Amino acid sequence: MRSSKYFIAIRILLVLLFAVSAVFYPQLPDRLASHWNAAGEADGYSSKFWGLFMLPLIATVLALLLILIPRLDPLKTNIEKFKGSYYQFIVAFLIFFLYIQALTIVFNLGYTFNMTLFLMPAFAVLFYFVGTMVGKAKRNYFIGIRTPWTLASDTVWDKTHALGAKLFKIAAGISLIGILFGQYAVWFMLVSVLIAAITTIIYSYIIFQREGKPRAASQ
């Protein structure tokens, strides 16, 4: 898929986020459940307007920021090398937001379900796309596992991101397994992602020391 097609998909998803909110606005109560605890029970509420349109607004700002990032990075030529995976992630990210918005609307229409358990598959898919993008990412200042050691060396960057790709995909699988453990599902997700992040940071330092503190490749 060419970049232009990704941009079209991004626009469509953003329009859908606002359109779905507008369509269901008259059918929903004035006070909406907008936050759920680890057990999947509603424990926070907001007005109907913010309950329906806060997520689309946040998604729009984040999408614009993510699209702008490659143009600001001094190593933008490196980002060009994995822009397909990067734009796929943005699309997956917006689908994730649309899914959350759909769950929120359905819940507030009176259909009771465990929100946490329904969110876990979406987090799993998102983590998988993160792993895919991380595995293809080239050295830059905004996207990927950015530590002092990965930014200092292409070799350290590549090896760290190869490991990170595997760990985030494993985290995706663990998040799915967590569904079997009810209210503890969210901890399977959080702990697996935290371990993946910490491991890659430590690994980047170890590789940097092992490689003899290599110099960064020429920009």
Image: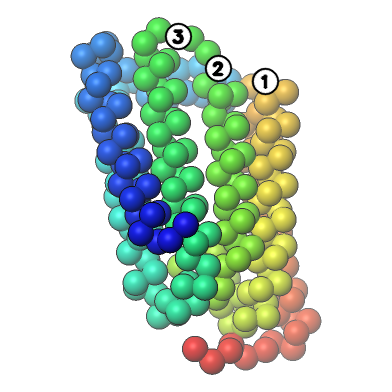
Spot occupied by residue 94 in the image (x, y as percentages of width and height)? 41, 43
- Residue 7 position (above or below residue 152): above
Residue at x 72%, y 62% (from the top left corner): 163
Query: Which sits in the foreground, 141 or 126?
Result: 126
- Residue 170 position (above or below residue 67): above
Circles 1 and 2 in contact, beta carbons < 8 Å: yes
Question: Sequence order check: which comes first, mark 1 or mark 3?
Answer: 3
Query: Which sits in the foreground, 207 or 99?
Result: 99
Q: Which residue is mark 3?
A: 111
Residue at x 66%, y 42% (from the top left corner): 172
Query: Which sits in the foreground, 73 or 81?
Result: 81
Tag of residue 182: 1
Spot occupied by residue 199 in the image (x, y as percentages of width and height)? 71, 59
Few, some or many C-alpha atoms within 10 Å of disc 1 (few <14, some 14-19, many ≥20)? some
Residue 191 in view in this figure = no
Residue at the far right: name it: 210
Q: Amino acid at mark 3?
A: Tyr
Q: Which residue is mark 2?
A: 114
Q: Separation of disc 1 and disc 2 at Cα?
A: 9 Å
Spot occupied by residue 140 in the image (x, y as percentages of width and height)? 50, 74
